Image (tube, helix red, strand yellow):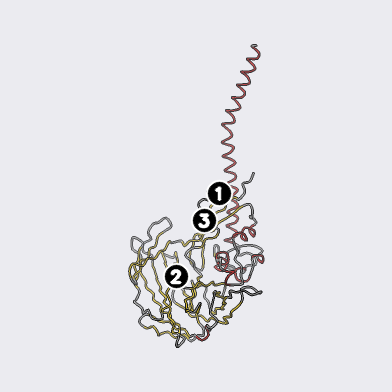
Amino acid sequence: MNASVEYLVAALLVFLLVSVTASSFIPDILLRATYISESQLRIEAEKIADQLLLHPGDPADWGVNSTYPSEINVLGLALEGGGPYDLDINKLIRIYESSLSEISEKEQVNLESMARLLGIYGRYSLSIKLTPLLNVTVQNISGNIHEITVKTHDDLPVANAMTRAVRVTAYVNQENKTVTYIEEPVENVTDYNGKATVEFAQLPEENKLGSIIVIFVDFYGVKTVFSSINEEAVCGVIIGNEIYVGHVDDDFNPEEFKTRKGRPGDPGGGAIHLYPAALHVTPTTLEPTILSAGTLQPITPEGSANPYYKFELEGLEKKSVMAIFVVKSQGAYKLVVARRAYNSLNVGVPTLATSPVARGAHIRRIVNISGFLYYFDLTLWRVVEES
C-alpha cells in the first residue's frame, strides 16, 4: 500500500515538473518561431522590393514594347539607364491602368501576372502603393479662388513651399475648326499653415469644353505634382509616344482642326500651325506636339464592337506630366487628358478586413518618377501559412 502511494506521488511530481517546464518553454519557442517566420517574410519582401525598384526587367523596355504579360521574362519597374530608384512611368501605367485592354491592344500586367512573374503565386500576395512625398490638396474657396494645402504624410504643414498652379481651359470653335487652350500660371508660397491661395481670371463660358488644374510644388528640391481634372473630361492612356483613347465618332477628323494657345488677356496670341496638335504640360510651360497618324482600330485582331483611337505623339518630353487634346465622342466635343504623373497609384491594395495583412511585412522606399518623388510602399503577406 505504501509503495503504491509512493509511485502515485512520484508520478504526480513528474507530471507537475513536465507541466511547469512546458509552460515555461513553449511560449518562448512559439515566440522564436514567430520571429523567424516574420524575419523570413521580411527578407522575401526586401528581395521583391529590390527586384522591382532596381531592375528594369527583361526585356528592359517591356512597358512599351510588350503586349501581353507572357512576353515578360523578368518583372522590374526601374527605368532603363536611370539612377537608383528611378522608375519607368510606362511600366507603372502597365500595372495600374485596368482599362488598357478596353482601349488598346495591350494587356494590363495585373496582380496575378505580377505574382507569377515574381515567383510567389499561391504562396504570397502583395500590394503596392505610390504616394507623393508631399501631400497636396486643392479646394475651391469661391469662384476662381483656390486654396492649396501642402503637408507631410504625418499631417504636418509645410511652410515656405513654392507652388505653381497652372489652369488650362479648352475651347472649341466648330465653325472654323479651331481648338484654343488658355494657359494661366499662378505662383505663391505656402504660409506657416502650409496653405497658399491662388486666383485665376474670369473666362468666358461660350464654347468652353472644360479645364484642368496642375499644381507643382517645390520644397527645397523635393518636388511633387498634383492634378485636378474636370469630371467631364475623357481619360486617355499614354504608353511611350502613343496615346490611346476610347470611343471617337466616325465623323471626327482631328487633322481638320488647328490648335492655338493663349493667355487670359490674349486668348489668340499663340497660333500653333499643327494639324492635328496636342499640348503636353511640363513644370514650366505648355508645349505643342504633333498628333500623327490617328487611326481607328479594332481592339483585337479579330475585331470588336468597341473601337479605339490611337495617336502617335511627336516630341513628347520626359518631363511631361500629361498630354491634352480634343476629340468628338458621342456627338459632343470633349477634352482628353492622358496623365504621366498620378496623384497616387494603388495596386492590389487589400481591404482592412484582410487579417493576414496585419502580419505582413511592410517595406518603404523613396523613388523618383519623371523628376518627382514618391513613397513606394510594398506589403507582402502569406496566402498559405508555412508549416
Residue 263 point in image, percent of width and height: 38, 80
Percent position (x, y) of residue 366? 50, 60
Q: Earlier in the sequence, mark 1 or mark 3?
A: 1
Q: In which quarter of the image is residue 47?
A: bottom right
**Mark 2 vs mark 3: in front:** 2
Check residue 364 in the rendering and tell me which mark sits there, or answer none.
3
What type is the residue that disc 1 sits on?
A: Pro
SS at mark 3 in the image: strand
Q: From mark 1 to mark 2, how far is it between C-alphas? A: 36 Å
Q: Residues within 10 Å of mark 2 (few under 14, many from 20)?
A: few
Q: Please, what is the three-letter code of the amino acid marked with disc 3? A: Arg
Looking at the rendered structure, the number of numbered marks drawn on it comes to 3
- Residue labelled with disc 1: 356
Q: Which residue: 57% across, 53% down?
A: 380
Q: Name the residue under label 2.
A: 231
Residue nearest the observer in this picture, 77 or 109: 109
Quadrant hosting residue 172: bottom left
Q: Residue 200's spot in the image, x, y percent?
A: 35, 74
Q: What's the CA distance linking mark 2 and mark 3?
A: 32 Å
Q: Residue visible at 45% across and 82% down?
A: 179
